[in-house]
Image (cartoon, grey):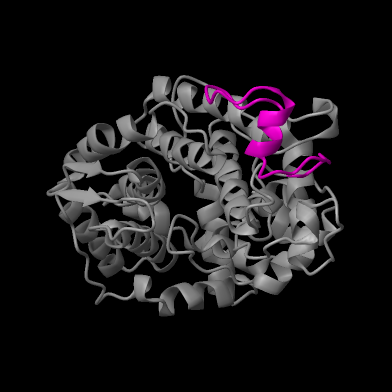
């Protein structure tokens, strides 16, 4: 009960935050980045305690876009207290052409647990906390393994949501009898899979690293955290191009892709490289969006732990977001870009990266700002990106 009082019984602070407007609210809610140290900061997987407090205050005040974002989450099937989960012992996920067993159910149940955990943190209603734990305990009591070709990606998508849900419940709710069983599930079933050798495909590698860093923070596992940081540093420069890289992109690590001819083929036959271009731009913008989201998630979680990955890749991430936002908004693709044809199917993947680059650092990102305004409030992609207008819009916390 002590932790519950810490989170919710702070009326004077909440009244102050709610009463403040405009720049006053931004200044009052801002927090400096924590210094790195031997201990992790909790909650610290994608959202910090100050971000959660700011979100609660904005929802309580009926401020936009948080009001609409919260309403969308609350009215979604994931936010319903009647949501039914479907835990399995073996989640079998082949490539897309073949039917799987438990793949959609696992991803959606992990998102539902995270949604209910957010509902608890915003509303303070115990029934949402209990619902989150029921979903999580159901899976931790049954799941043994992931199998078939898509197992690493499936584990990454689900693991990223489980880590966020677990982090919120572990550090904002004091009554979780089966927590250690959930810990074991993440450590024994998820972490080894998402730490496997980096796959050739870049968005897989980044999604796996997103899950790995979240699980590492949840488990207070410094070694796993450092491994995820190293993997980020190796892959991001090989996925998003900057002119400063030279005439061709950085070669992706441990993939066997070497030299210009192989790189052009690996970049879906794109022969010309300009700042902001991504390895999968000429495949489609949906997969680019996955990579932008995962890159931002990793950097955001590291930021809360005192590691500034954003600073290392600020120009690269900004260029990628502006480049793809421009064409997602409808700009005509020139002939040199993917033969003049791009597939504009990018999802709600920009909130977290924009939050840091534009809100915290004040960098101009006009194309991304337009795209976010068009897409808000961001919902859930039913994979691993959920409710990020609610959690990351606005203030520089």
Name the residue: 63% across, 52% down.
Answer: 283
Residue 374 in magenta stretch: no
Magenta region, main secondary structure: loop
* Magenta span of residues: 250-277
Residue 268 in magenta stretch: yes
In the foreground, 243 or 229: 243
Q: Is residue 303 left or right of residue 237?
A: left
Task: Choose top left, top right, bottom left or bottom right for residue 128.
Answer: bottom left
In the foreground, 39 or 351: 351
Name the residue: 65% across, 69% down.
Answer: 19
What is the count of numbered marks? 0
Q: Can you give x and y, in whole percent of width and height, for residue 29 in the image?
A: 64, 52
In the foreground, 155 or 125: 155
Q: Can you give x and y, in whole percent of width and height, for residue 326 in the image?
A: 80, 60
- Name, please, the residue furthest toward the front: 261
Task: Choose top left, top right, bottom left or bottom right for residue 187.
Answer: top left
Rendered position, 144 above or below 83: above
Q: Is residue 134 visible?
A: yes
Q: Is residue 236 left or right of residue 329?
A: left
Q: Can you give x and y, in whole percent of width and height, for residue 282 in the image?
A: 69, 51
Q: Is residue 197 left or right of residue 314?
A: left
Q: Can you give x and y, in whole percent of width and height, for residue 381 in the image?
A: 49, 64
Q: Is residue 21 visible?
A: no
């Amino acid at each position: 009960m002590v932790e519950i009082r810490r989170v919710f019984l702070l009326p004077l602070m909440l009244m102050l935050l709610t009463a403040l407007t405009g720049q006053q609210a931004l200044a009052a809610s801002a927090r400096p980045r924590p210094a790195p140290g031997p201990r992790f900061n909790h909650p610290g997987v994608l959202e910090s305690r100050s971000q959660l407090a700011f979100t609660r205050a904005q929802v309580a005040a009926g401020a936009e876009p948080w009001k609409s974002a919260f309403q969308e989450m609350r009215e979604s099937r994931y936010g319903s207290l009647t949501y039914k989960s479907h835990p399995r012992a073996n989640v079998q996920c082949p490539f897309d052409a073949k039917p799987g067993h438990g793949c959609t159910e696992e991803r959606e149940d992990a998102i539902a647990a995270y949604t209910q955990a957010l509902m608890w943190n915003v509303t303070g209603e115990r029934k949402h906390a209990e619902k989150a734990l029921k979903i999580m305990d159901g899976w931790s009591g049954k799941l043994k393994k992931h199998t078939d070709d898509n197992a690493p990606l499936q584990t990454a998508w689900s693991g990223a949501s489980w880590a966020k849900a677990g982090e919120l419940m572990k550090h904002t709710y004091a009554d979780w009898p089966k927590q250690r069983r959930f810990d074991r599930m993440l450590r024994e079933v998820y972490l080894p899979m998402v730490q496997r050798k980096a796959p050739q495909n870049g968005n897989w590698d980044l999604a796996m690293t997103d899950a790995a860093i979240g699980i590492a923070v949840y488990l207070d596992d410094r070694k796993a955290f450092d491994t995820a940081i190293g993997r980020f540093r190796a892959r991001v420069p090989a996925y998003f191009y900057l002119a400063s890289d030279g005439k061709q992109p950085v070669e992706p690590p441990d993939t066997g892709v070497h030299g210009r001819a192989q790189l052009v083929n690996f970049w879906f036959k794109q022969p010309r490289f300009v700042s902001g271009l991504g390895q999968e731009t000429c495949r489609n913008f949906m997969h680019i969006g996955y990579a932008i989201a995962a890159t931002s998630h990793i950097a955001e979680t590291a930021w809360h732990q005192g590691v500034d990955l954003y600073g290392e890749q600020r120009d690269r991430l900004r260029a990628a977001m502006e480049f793809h936002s421009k064409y997602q908004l409808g700009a005509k693709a020139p002939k040199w870009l993917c033969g003049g044809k791009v597939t504009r199917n990018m999802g709600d993947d920009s909130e977290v990266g924009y939050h840091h680059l534009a809100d915290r650092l004040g960098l101009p990102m006009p194309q991304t700002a337009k795209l976010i305004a068009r897409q808000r409030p961001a919902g859930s992609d039913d994979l691993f990106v959920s409710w990020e207008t609610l959690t990351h819009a606005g203030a520089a916390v």
